[in-house]
Amino acid sequence: MPLPLHPWGGEGRGEAGGTPTFASFFIALVLAFLSILPAAAAPPGVLIVGQTAEPKSLDPHTVTALNDFRIAANLYDGLVRYRDGTLEIEPALAESWTVSEDGTVYTFHLRPGITFHDGTAFDAEAVAFNFRRMLEADHPYHDTGPFPLAHFFAAIREIEVVDPLTVRFRLDAPFAPLLSNLAYPTGFMVSPAAVRKWGKSYGRHPAGTGPFRFTTWDSGIRVVLERNDGYWDGAPALDAVVFRPIYDANTRVTELLAGGIDLVVGIPPDVIPILRDRADFMVHEQAGPHLWFLILNMREAPFSDRRMRLAVNYAIDRRALVEKVLQGTATVATGPVPRAFGWAYDTALDPYPYDPEKARALINEAGYAGEEIVFAVTQGGSGMLDPVAMATAIQADLAAVGLDVAIESFEWNTYLARVNRGLEGQAAMAEMAWMTNDPDTLPYLALRSAAFPEEGGFNSGYYANPEVDRLVEAARRTTDRNERARLYKAIQRIVHEDAPWAVIASWKQNAVTRAGVRGFRLQPSFLLRFEGVSKE
């Protein structure tokens, strides 16, 4: 049931209370305007964003999808953040920090005077609440999870509140990705008071410290954020941002052309050249650490047989997918570390070549007898490129070498729920995409044997190799970048040989804005940030 569209307070507001403001009345008028004439252009100062799917939750600790994170990035801050346009770390809610010589103690000094959107104080106790909630099973609000990416902070052994503006993390060993993980949305700070008030419903009533504050979530229609005038880093120029879930890519384009939205993410490849030639639109493109791949179910036939996994890899024409289906908006990828992490990427490793004859020979050798292979596909979602068209082309490639592949498609959030609980008993293969913040992310969360779905990880195909497990743990625990690079390259070579996935492409992310939108830029983190955006 949709939430009431209250302009302030009540069920529609993720705050402990408050009085109506001029901005609140303005937002109410905007909502009424949009309800009557959804395809009309919104007033200046209100940015309408077309997203690829409905968010699952606005609790950044409990979700994994980019759709959710892109909204959260405007509601929340972390202790640190990515510097604009980079993956480099800079201060945010922590104005400074120190690291012990052995790399196991991080002390963060917090900015004074910051409050959450519900009016409660941001301090060291709030920081401790956030991480203890995720990491401690006996925490009184741990049941507001699950916390699927709490692995990011598993190295934290102890959280010490030194004083109101100082918090200290003691790690069980050096952990190189910690600062990068703290900048990722899973490290965003939520209001402890709001979590206590709303419990498991907190994700519908979020309160952070970010440049925008939550106003309403009308299910299937929009999420509305309004300007936080008291933002610690300066109030944004926009009065409000409205996120609209529009699953169909062609509908997103139609809405953009009709003036119903100001910014669209996930534009179909064939539309980009048309919009690039129009003066009333701006096309934004940027490569980043993205990976699109097929998970192969190694727990059941046929892909429990390595020969069949290799056959799939040889049967897929990656170059044709990138050039024809994606029309040059992606590049062919090789392994679980995206090329964007140049220092850790193994340039000596080549993608599997397109070799249908070799694929047929491997299939015959494996004794495949024509059994149906179920291929789970999403209709759209975070970083999924053009998933139905991609799946159809892959299905044709596999049919050409004698594999009987049946596509089963699902809405994005339904799809995530199915795939994340594991492919056993459901499908032989599934599409997946990840936008990562560190070379550690995919190997640790999706390739370790301790990351099977029943253990809370994302190894939905049940890949297990003890040497990969050992290398992943070693790479996390060294702060020497050259040694980390050596270890990640070793991981890539083993995974390439074992072929638990068919790695296909890395996306050059895109967005299109109307000409009146100023100050927008894509981020290599794939997040959307609107604190510096204005609209004429």
Image (spheres, rainbow, N blue to C red):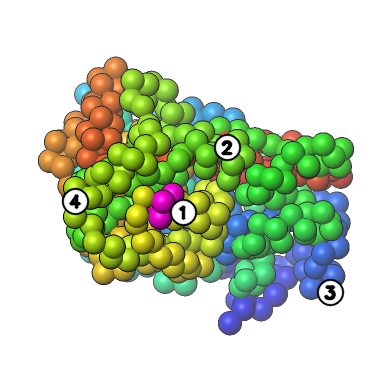
* Label ID, residue 366: 4
Residue wearing tag 1: 396
Discs 2, 3 touching: Cβ within 8 Å: no
Report the residue at 85% width, 39% height from top: 278
Q: Position of residue 309 (x, y in %)?
A: 27, 47
User: Alpha carbon of mark 1 to alpha carbon of mark 3: how far?
Assistant: 44 Å
Is 114 placed left or right of 447 in the picture?
A: right
Q: Which kind of residue does numbered mark 3 sit on? A: Ile
In this view, the mark in front (2 or 3): 2
Nearest to the observer: residue 6 or residue 224: 224
Discs 4, 1 touching: Cβ within 8 Å: no
Which tag, 1 or 3, sits closer to the chain's start?
3
Report the residue at 62% width, 78% height from top: 2
Q: Which kind of residue does numbered mark 4 sit on? A: Ala
Main secondary structure along the magenta-highlighted residues: helix
Q: Is residue 406 magenta?
A: no
* Label ID, residue 36: 3
Residue range highlighted in magenta: 396-400
In this view, the mark in front (1 or 3): 1
Above or below, 394 against 323 in this view is: below
Is 250 placed left or right of 302 in the picture?
A: right
Residue wearing tag 2: 323
Which tag, 1 or 2, sits closer to the chain's start?
2
Report the residue at 84% width, 74% height from top: 36
Nearest to the observer: residue 470 or residue 230: 470
Q: Position of residue 354 (x, y in %)?
A: 40, 36
